[in-house]
Structure formats: structure tokens, C-alpha cells
Amino acid sequence: MKLFSSVNDVTDIQSLVKEALHLKQNPYAYQQLGKNKTLGLVFLNPSLRTRMSTQKAGLNLGMNVMVLNMDKEGWALELQDGVIMNSNTVEHIREAAAVLGQYADIIGLRSFPGLKDRNDDYSENIFNKFVKYCGVPVVSLESATRHPLQSLADLVTIEELKTTPRPKVVMTWAPHIKALPQAVPNSFAEWMCKADVDFTIVHPRGYELCGDFTQGATITHNQDEALADADFIYVKNWSAYEPYGKIFSGNEDWMLTNERLKITNNAKIMHCLPVRRNLELSDEILDGKNSIVVHEAANRVWAAQAVLKRMLETLS
Ligand code: CP
């Protein structure tokens, strides 16, 4: 594997999930694979889980790991070609990515969307330019439209904790005060549509996701109907795709409570984190026995390790 940017870069999802669960049982079994190999993690935006779990995954595989918080510590990046750089940007992505590719055997990149220009965000302008110019395998640490390491960890978690062969998985929109990207819900939908699950997306009218990511999902606007008999509930806020990046008021009652859980099949509650308590998810849910959000975050290590192992096998 030379690129991990979406589910489409994976030939056999089930085999990658199995690999992650195997690594969870045998974290240090492949330390020779990463010996004298360097992982460079480049963040254009903040992170807790992705940064630490991917770093740990690289270390478990015997790699050296370097982290660059480019948004705070790097030079201001220019993305446009042919411009006269006489304003605030200091370094062009052409040189920055090419140089980083000289220092690392594998690079991870986090590049959030601006949420202003949909065409620019959905073209994955920053991520694709970085891939083009760095010249080494690249792992997405969340791009403008997708978060594949999160989605793989989510699928690993469902596989691990499911009690029926084909569980009902419901992704429900949740309230928030800020406009958040569609990357996590796009990506979760894309992975669930290819997994062996019964998948439903429920959201208020106006929050329809781009149809490219939801082919095969049941999509509805009635939260109670959607949650009925659910085995897993994936809670997430996102801003509108059309009009792009906008949020609408009046949906505060979409926050999940214990009362709503009664109609589910004792559903396990997932969230990628960070989560705003009592806005997106109630204290009673997060502190209750059905929440698996920390277990899910822990699985980020094994998802990242499975992907890095596949990339290292390509290198050697
Ligand atoms: N879920 C997730 O990607 O968390 P961070 O933004 O903290 O990395």
C-alpha cells in the first residue's frame, strides 16, 4: 500500500480489520519491519488521538517517528502555483512536501477543509498536492473530505463488539455551535457502505451529505424511527454540504439521551472525539455503560498500525 486516503485504497477491508485485531494481540511482533524507517507526521491542524495513536503505532512497529505541528511551528504554506509570494506565505508546498519526503519513509498528513469553497475542499487540493510532491507513501490523518484511520478504527470496534453477524449501525447527526467538516461522517458512511452491516444515516433536513459517500445507506430524517433496534449508534455533528459549511438553528433536541436509548437494541454509543458534553452528547450517555468512545479511541492505534505495516511491507 502506497497511499491510504480512503476506503478505495484498501483491496480487502475485512483482511485489514483482521490485521488490526491481530496487531492488538501482538503489538511488538513486527518491530524488525520498521527498523531504520522513519515516520513523519505533519499536522496542519490540531489533534490529540490521531497524533498520539499514529505515533504509538509507528513506535510499536520499530519506526522512528517525527512530528511537525506545521500550523504552529512550520512556515506559512503557499498552495497556489505561479503566484508572486509577496504576502504572508513563506514556503511553497512544492518545496515543503519534497523536503519532508527526503526525511521520512512514510508521511502522515492532516489537512482540514476551509469550509468556504466546496470545490476546493472536495478536490482535496492540499492533500493531493502534498502526495504529488513528497514522493513517499502517504497516510491521511484526516483530510478535507475523509478521515480513513478513524473509520477503520470504528469498523474494528464494531467487529470486535458486535453480538450479531450483521449489526444495525445508525449514524445520527448531533447538535453543535460551530460549523464542523463533513470528513468524519463522509468517511464513516463510505466505510459502512462497504462493510457487512445494516447502515442508516439520520439527520435534520438540510444536512444531506454528498451522495458520493452514502451509496447503499438508508437515509432518513426521523431520529426515533432510525434508532429503533440499533446495535451501534455513531454520533457526529457536521455542517451542511449545500449551502456549503452552513449550520441551522432549531435542532438542539437531536442530542442523544438515555430515554432515546430505550428504543434501541441496548445500542453501543460511538463518537470519534473530541466531543462537547451536553451539547453533542449528554453526560448520562458518555458516563453510562453503553458508551464505547474510549475503547473506540484506543483502537486508533491498531488501525494505524495495520495501515503502516502494509506500507512498510511495500517498502521492504
Ligand atoms: N478523532 C480524532 O481524529 O481525534 P483528534 O482530532 O484529536 O486527532
Image: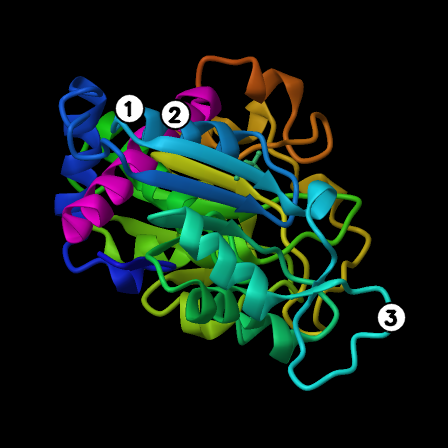
Tell me residue 276's x, y (percent): 70, 31
User: Residue at position x 48%, y 27% from top?
Assistant: 52
Q: Circle 2 sits in a helix, a strand or a loop, which is it?
A: helix
Task: Tell me if residue 123 is in the magenta stretch.
Answer: no
Nearer to the camera, 116 or 204: 116
Nearer to the camera, 291 or 255: 291
Instruction: Describe residue 284's horizontal placement relative to residue 15 as left or right.
Output: right
- Is disc 1's CB within 8 Å of ligand 1? no
Residue 37 quadrant: top left
Q: Which amino acid does label 3 sit on?
A: Ser
Nearer to the camera, 210 or 59: 59
Tell me residue 20's x, y (percent): 22, 34
| Badge 3 density bin: few <14, some 14–19, many ≥20, Cα 10 Å | few
User: Residue at position x 76%, y 64% from top?
Assistant: 246
User: Residue at position x 20%, y 19% from top?
Assistant: 28
Q: Circle 3 sits in a helix, a strand or a loop, which is it?
A: loop
The residue identified by callout 2 is: 56
- Residue 248: which disc? none
Residue 166 quadrant: top left
| Badge 2 density bin: few <14, some 14–19, many ≥20, Cα 10 Å | some
Residue lying furthest right: 87
Q: CB under 8 Å between callouts 2 and 1? A: yes
- Is disc 3's CB within 8 Å of ligand 1? no
- Residue 60: which disc? 1
Mark found first going from the N terminus, 3 or 1: 1
Q: What residue type is labelled 1?
A: Asn
Range covered by the magenta-colored residues: 291-316
The residue identified by callout 3 is: 87
